[in-house]
């Protein structure tokens, strides 16, 4: 898959009316997303279920180890042994249910020189803009202890809700969510 194909695939989310959201975590683990006040931290991935189609968001190695990917369908088809939690009415998703996703933006980051193998950039973040102005950012990241900044390229998916939270906790390429994203 190349960046143009990835962008086209991700833009399939545009126009989808959100009906349900599910988080996937390691079997036997306590739902980690409940323990962090400012973000949701999910080990395996997320389902975004619409009225007529569904997509899953997860970390993978399509471009580089620990980047993001969006696939049509649900993650349960790919991870049968997992802890699945319907968070539609929990966390910060409840106010977004019933809204359409008006725009999706991919935040591309430059591949670190130590891992450069003809690949120049990878999808570190995916931003959803909803019809009533709300913003949600997915990132293949983990929160750094102490600083609460994101440690990118992680085997985890972080969900940040709202521009203020994104500005406060995300790294440089997310600072201005209303401008077209560029990779750093």
Image (cartoon, rainbow, N blue to C red):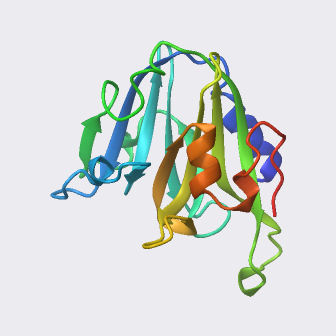
Q: What's the residue at 68%, 63% (across, down)?
A: 63
Q: Nearer the viewer, residue 119 or 138?
A: 138
* Visible residue check, residue 129: yes
- What quarter of the picture does the C terminus occupy? bottom right
Compared to residue 128, the image places residue 100 above or below, namely: above
- The residue depicted at 31 percent of the width and 30 percent of the height is 90
Q: Position of residue 129 (x, y in %)?
A: 66, 29
Q: Nearer the viewer, residue 59 or 30?
A: 30
Q: Residue at x 50, y 14 (%)?
A: 52
Residue 119: quarter of image: bottom right
- Residue 121 left/right relative to 161: right
Residue 181 point in image, percent of width and height = 80, 47
Q: Could you tell me residue 23's position as x and y percent?
A: 35, 42
For the question of whether residue 1 can be seen, the reply is no
Q: Is residue 178 left or right of residue 124?
A: right
Foreground pick, 151 / 2: 151
Left/right of residue 149 with respect to residue 39 in the rendered view: right
**In the shown orientation, is residue 40 left or right of residue 116?**
left
Q: Residue 111: x percent and y percent?
A: 75, 72
Identify the residue at image location x=43%, y=42%: 46
């Amino acid at each position: 898959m190349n960046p143009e194909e990835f962008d086209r695939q991700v833009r399939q989310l545009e126009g989808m009316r959100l009906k349900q959201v599910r988080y996937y975590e390691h079997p036997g683990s306590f739902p980690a997303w409940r323990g962090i006040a400012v973000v949701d931290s999910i080990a395996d991935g997320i389902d975004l279920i619409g009225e007529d189609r569904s997509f899953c968001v997860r970390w993978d190695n399509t471009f580089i180890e620990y980047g993001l990917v969006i696939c049509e369908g649900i993650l349960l088809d790919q991870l049968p042994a997992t802890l699945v939690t319907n968070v539609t009415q929990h966390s910060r998703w409840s106010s977004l249910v019933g809204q359409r996703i008006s725009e999706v933006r991919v935040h591309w980051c430059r591949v670190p020189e130590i891992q450069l193998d003809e690949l120049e950039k990878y999808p570190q973040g995916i931003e959803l803009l909803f019809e009533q102005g709300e913003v949600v950012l997915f990132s293949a990241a983990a929160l750094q202890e102490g600083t609460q900044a994101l440690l990118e390229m992680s085997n985890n998916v972080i969900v940040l809700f709202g521009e203020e939270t994104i500005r406060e906790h995300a790294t440089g390429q997310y600072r201005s969510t209303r401008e077209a994203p560029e990779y750093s």
